[in-house]
Image: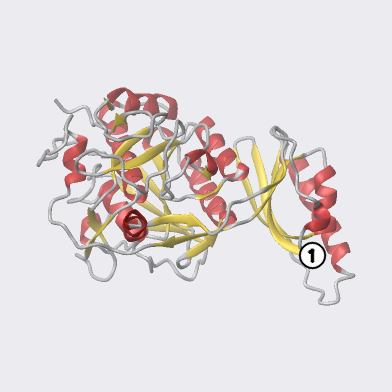
Amino acid sequence: MAWFRTLALFLFTVTPYVTALPLKTTKEGSVLDVDALEDEARYIVTLHKNISPSAFAIHLAKINDTYHHNSLNDEQNRPSGVGKTFAIGDYRGYSGVFDKDTIALLWKDADVAEIELDEFCTIQGKLVTQRHAPWGLAALSSKKPGAKSYRYDKSAGNGTFAYVVDSGVFTKHDEFGGRASVRYSVDPSNLSDVMGHGTHVAGIIAGKTFGVAKQAEIIGVKVFPGSSGLVSDVLHGFSWAVQDIVLKGRQNRSVINLSIASPFSFAFNRAVDAAFELGILSVVAAGNAGMEARKMSPVSAAEALAVGAINSEWTQTIFSNFGPEVNIQAPGYHIESAFTGTENATNTMSGTSMSAPHVAGLALYLAALENTQNATQLRDRILELGVEGKAKELTSDTPNLVAHNGAR
């Protein structure tokens, strides 16, 4: 069981407690027995495309009225109903606590595409000993393992924006030089990064020492108040990030990093795809379960740029999820970056949580250097520059492509 101990030691990403089960799907037609559901539970509801804002509002009011009417018969009288709502392009959805009678009515509603349980995600794992050299950066400007230096254009992501949907960012860290801020928090009274995960990710994207795009601005989107959070909380923060990018006209100068893995979620995948349709690229972690990526989200979203993890020998790590959904490989083992505690704190971590920000930083680097105009062009360019056939021990159906910045 040595492999299991290795996996446990280097697991540091957002992983699910259990696998989500769809309550209604338009593709597979498989559903759960409504009578078997709990009396009240948390759900995420996704509507069909092209629901107008007014129709969305009417739908929400109808569902709330139905739920609150049902709750009058609840001896504990604890009505909840619709909680968070999500609107990205033509994607509409919402989360909330509903009784099974309300879910039964939603099941029959012509506006509803999918219903799923609102699962918990959690950040978990252990830290490993610090290493001095950020080998991951060197790998991005090399076409074979063993490089010692990172070669890059001096533009270094200038004028670009990294939206880090994570546990927050320690904005006072020296790595960020005043370029980092936390603009959204699931708990508005607490903007701090208590886990250090988001700070580490942000340092890989845009830290002055450890970062790929060393001049990019970092926008922290805190969706985890501690070590765990709901998929609906992540979706709400993600929706905020998309709206902020669109409102400020940053579509061709921004990327959203999601070093997050949840149970498979229609809602999460559709949100990522809807953002892409608006010209916004989401770079996502493949996940650290050592399993088929298609079983998790948002790695299984059609329009995500999904990143697996390799080590310094360019060998696929034992924890990295795999399959055709994983678009590209990047350094994700023994990666040093910024951490919380002091203004110069660092830690070394492993996981696809670390490989995704290497590619998110690369996306910003290329956006500034080559003036890419949209998410499609940017994703295509990253895949075009990737080094083919050099990763080792990949699962047979995983694309053999390692991220590269185009340096010669």
Residue 371 percent across, percent down from the top left: 31, 27
Q: Is residue 154 above or below residue 222?
A: above
For the N terminus, give its image quadrant. Answer: bottom left
Q: Is residue 369 above or below residue 13?
A: above
Residue 272 percent across, percent down from the top left: 53, 39
Q: Residue at x 75, y 36 (%)?
A: 29
Which residue is tagged 1? Answer: 39
Query: In the current view of this chain or complex, which residue is farthest to the front?
Result: 1
Q: Residue at x 35, y 55 (%)?
A: 7
Residue 133 percent across, percent down from the top left: 13, 51
Nearer to me, 397 or 199: 397
- Crowd around label 1: few <14 · some 14–19 · many ≥20 (10 Å): few
253 sits left or right of 362 in the view: right
Nearer to me, 399 or 211: 399
Nearer to me, 290 or 154: 290
Q: Residue at x 58, y 52 (%)?
A: 19
For the C terminus, give its image quadrant. Answer: top left
